[in-house]
Structures are given as C-alpha cells and as structure tokens.
Amino acid sequence: MDSIRFMPINFRLEAAAALSRLAYRGDELRAGDMHASADYYSRKYGVPIEVFDGLVETFEFVKARVRIEESELIALFGQFEGFESNLHDQFLMLEHSLGKTRVHELNYRIATMIADDDAEPDFDHADLAALMAYAKNLTATDEAKWLFVDSCIRYEEYRARLDRILDQVEPLIREKADLLEPYVKESLGKFEDDASGGKLFSHLSESGLRLDCTKADVYPYLMQFSSIMLYSNVLAAAHFGEEEQTFLSYGVLVDRINNSSKSGRDAVESMLTLLHALDDKRRLEILTALKNRSLYGQEIVAITGLSAATISHHMSELGGAGLISIEKQGVKLLYHLNSKRLAEMAELIQQNFLS
C-alpha cells in the first residue's frame, strides 16, 4: 500500500444506497427499511437502538420527500434474482473498471459485464452475440435478462435515468449532513493518522478481506452501514496504462456490529448464522474443496460444476458467516477457508451442548 486517502461523505453514493433500500422487496429484515434494519441489528447484536437514530432520521427524511415511479425505482435500484448487484451498482463497477471514456464503448462494456469475477475480459470477441449468449444462460427471470442486455446496449439512456433520480435524492441527504458526520468520525477516525493504510488494511484482513492494491480512497458508508463495498480500476490499469486506484466504501457501523457479535452475548445467533451458511450441499462442497488449498472462482466452478453466478452467491453467504476469507489479486479473487471460524463453531457447540 503506497497511500490511502480518507474521503468525506459521498452524498451521491449515499443517495444510491438509500434508493436501494427503498427499492428492496425481499424479506431480509436487514436489507430494506431502515427502521427494520436498525431493529434487526439491535436485537441480534445488542447494539443500542439509539445508535441508529441519525441514520433512521435521514432515511425517513428521504423516504417522505422522494417522488419516483415504482417501476422506475425497481428497475434501476431493485435487486433481481440471479444478480449480485442492482443496475446502479453494475454501472458503478463498469465506470470504475473502464474509466469515463471507455465505458461509452459497447464492446468494452460487453466484455466487462460478461467476464467472470476472476477472469480477464475478452475485448476482442465482445459483441452482441456474446452478450445474448451470456444472458441466455443466466439463472434469472426473462425480465431481469432483458434489463441486463438492454442496459448494456443503451448505457447512456439508463445512466441519464439514474442521474435524474440521484439528482433528486442527493440534496436531501446533504440536508442531514450534521446528523451523519459523527458516524464518520467514530468509524474511520481511528485509522486516519496512518496515511500508509496499514492499520485499516490489517484490520480488514482480520475480518476476512485481503486487498492487493497500491492506492485507495476510503469513503464512509452510511445508508448501508453494515456493508463494505469495493471498486477498482484495475482493468484500466492493466490494459490501458492508467494509474491503479481502489475505492472502498466502509460501513460506519461494521466494527460496532462485529465487536458486539464477538462479545459472546449472542452465541445462539452466531451459531444459527453458521448453521444457515452450512445448510446447503453445494456450500459444503465448496468448503470441502477449499480444505485442500485456496482457490480462484473459476477453479471452484470447474471442481463443483456450478455456474459462476451460483458460486458468487454461495461465496457471499459463506463470507457473510466468516467461513471464508477473500483476497483480491488484481482482477482475480482468491478464496481461503477460514479454519479459525470453524474452530469457533466447534467451541460454541462444545460450550452450549457438550459441557
């Protein structure tokens, strides 16, 4: 790590995160309405409910004032089954990966969107036929497949639609800046005296995320307070000679939640999280494969016979339970088995059932 910059609140990113919450239509309590999310984390991890007051007030302020057609909100910021990210986040990935000029070139967009997580994009053979073939094999609804294809082809039109909504919501988030700044100081202040980034990245490594990058801009993440989001221009750096840069959005309550989780006051919930992650034959197959050695995503695809999208979903579940750690190596992701977490599970079983 050569240098790290701690950035101020990115109000446009926060606007997108708030809209993603508004668009959520699933049954996962922590993913949608901010009231429900705060209650979930308070009950599960023992975080005092008043800790969430500023975040809830900001979200409710936006919710009461934003005016967007339901269909437009869902299309641009909703989560479709079979996809790891919504359309807005997909566009962010494209823009960071390719840069603001090349993202307007269709073949670059196609190559990037259809490349597997740990594979190099094939810019020379990226055409509409490749895009359609990729979409056809996705495990998603026809509506979601069409949106994937259409948004890739008509990127500028969809970007304009996104920007019109973000232009409406961003000023609303800014109005609540005074409520949000204390979260930033508490979460990232302890790292800001280390310009090398060693303190933060050692902390991330302990949490299961290992990064291989030279420069990083770190933003607080408020409306998705329990998440860590990572974007990089490593593709542009590798293929087009741009200076490598990583962008990290760090959930302002990630450490608070993790510390509460480790305090031991919620051993039953911790065990349930682990058991849920293991309650799938395919995830057990993945863990068994990782027992022998660390693997890249494509290696896991080859070993298990599962699709890349299915593997990505299962790795997200296993990572959320702390059963694997992820190492970013350029465009590739290397997955490691977290033996320490499995040992903790064995200890929980010993303490709660066998002693």
Image (cartoon, rainbow, N blue to C red):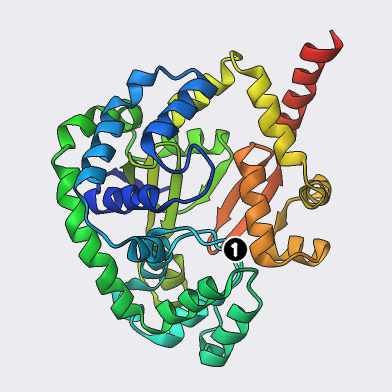
At 71% from the left edge and 67% from the top edge, which residue is drawn? 307
Using residue 80 as the reference point, say whether residue 6 is left or right of it. left
- Along the line of sight, the residue nearer the viewer: 87 or 9: 87
- Along the line of sight, the residue nearer the viewer: 125 or 215: 125
160 above or below 248?
below
Residue 138 place in picture, x, y as percent = 63, 73
Residue 235 place in picture, x, y as percent = 46, 70
Asked if residue 83 shows in the view, the reply is: yes
At 82% from the left edge and 51% from the top edge, which residue is drawn? 285
Q: Residue furthest top?
A: 355
Q: Which residue is mark 1?
A: 82
Using residue 259 as the reference point, say whether residue 322 is left or right of it. right
Amino acid type, label 1? Gly
**Quadrant location of residue 348?**
top right
Q: Residue furthest front?
A: 70
- Along the line of sight, the residue nearer the viewer: 310 or 59: 59
115 above or below 254?
below
Q: Secondary structure at mark 1?
A: loop
Residue 95 place in picture, x, y as percent = 36, 69
